[in-house]
Image (spheres, helix red, strand yellow):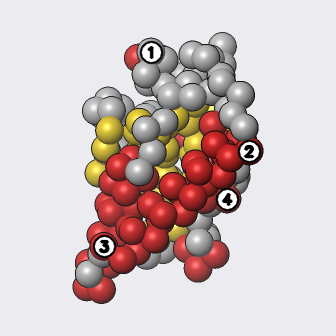
């Protein structure tokens, strides 16, 4: 997919849209909705406020079970991601470090291959919620998007870090 070079004003608009999406998610969730309510609202708000972002979901790691998107929005792919230390999801969960992953990668896992026509890259973000390891995923149709706007919007809040 093309990688348009954006000027500084366009990049700042993207950053502002992401910040606005985060604030909308915070303000849209009733206090009693809890963390899941916030995560659901965040996935929705990120996609609603940015035409480049096409896929958002999160998953919880359970021993011996594949990762499955919880509250998958945008593209409906529904992967079952089998545990594999070479898979980017499990690399992120084991290292507890966020990663941007290009779908053009020659070692792209099979579960991501069907998305190549719709997405150029994804960001994978580990976080912890209620003592459980979890993974957030956001997909962009634009190559280099996360590098251009920065990844800080997608990183977990320090209070959630595991």
Q: Position of residue 124 (x, y in %)?
A: 57, 45
Which residue is drawn at the image coordinates 31% and 45% (left, top)?
Answer: 72
Going from the N terminus, do you reach mark 4 or mark 2 first?
Answer: 2
Q: Residues within 10 Å of mark 4 (few under 14, many from 20)?
A: few
* Front residue (pair 49, 25): 49
Nearer to us in this view, 97 or 142 = 142
The residue under label 1 is: 117
First in residue order: circle 3 vs circle 2: 2
- Per the image, the residue denoted by label 4 is 152
Comparing labels 4 and 2, the label whose residue is closer to the camera: 2
Q: Earlier in the sequence, mark 3 or mark 1?
A: 3
Q: Nearer the viewer, mark 3 or mark 1?
A: 3
Report, in whole angstroms, how far the alpha carbon at label 3 lies from the one at label 2.
30 Å
> What is the C-alpha distance between the residues marked 1 and 2?
28 Å
User: Which label lies toward us, 3 or 2?
Assistant: 2
Residue 70 versus residue 111 in the image, above or below: below
Q: Nearer the viewer, mark 1 or mark 2?
A: 2
Q: Secondary structure at mark 3?
A: helix
Q: Secondary structure at mark 4?
A: helix
Picture quarter with the C terminus:
bottom right
Can you give x and y, in whole percent of width and height, for residue 31 in the image? 30, 86
Asked if residue 33 lies left or right of residue 125, the reply is left
When asked about the image quadrant of residue 144, the answer is top right
Mark 1, other Cα within 10 Å: few <14 / some 14–19 / many ≥20: few
Dot 3 corresponds to which residue? 28
**Residue drawn 39% across and 68% down?**
24
Q: Identify the mark nearer the N-term, 4 or 1.
A: 1
**Extreme residue in the bottom direction:** 31
As measured in the structure, the alpha-carbon distance from the residue carrying label 4 to the one carrying label 2 is: 17 Å
């Amino acid at each position: 997919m093309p990688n348009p070079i954006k000027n500084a004003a366009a990049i700042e608009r993207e950053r502002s849209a992401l910040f606005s999406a985060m604030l909308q998610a915070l303000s849209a969730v009733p206090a009693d909705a809890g963390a899941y309510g916030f995560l659901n609202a965040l996935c929705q708000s990120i996609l609603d406020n940015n035409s480049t972002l096409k896929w958002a979901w999160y998953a919880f790691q359970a021993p011996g079970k594949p990762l499955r998107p919880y509250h998958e929005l945008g593209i409906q792919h529904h992967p079952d991601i089998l545990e594999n230390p070479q898979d980017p999801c499990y690399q992120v969960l084991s290292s507890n470090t966020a990663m941007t992953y290009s779908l053009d990668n020659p070692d792209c896992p099979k579960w991501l291959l069907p998305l190549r026509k719709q997405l150029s890259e994804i960001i994978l973000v580990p976080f912890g919620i209620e003592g459980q390891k979890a993974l957030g995923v956001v997909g962009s149709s634009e190559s280099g998007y996360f590098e251009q706007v920065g990844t800080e919007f997608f990183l977990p809040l320090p209070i959630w870090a595991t």
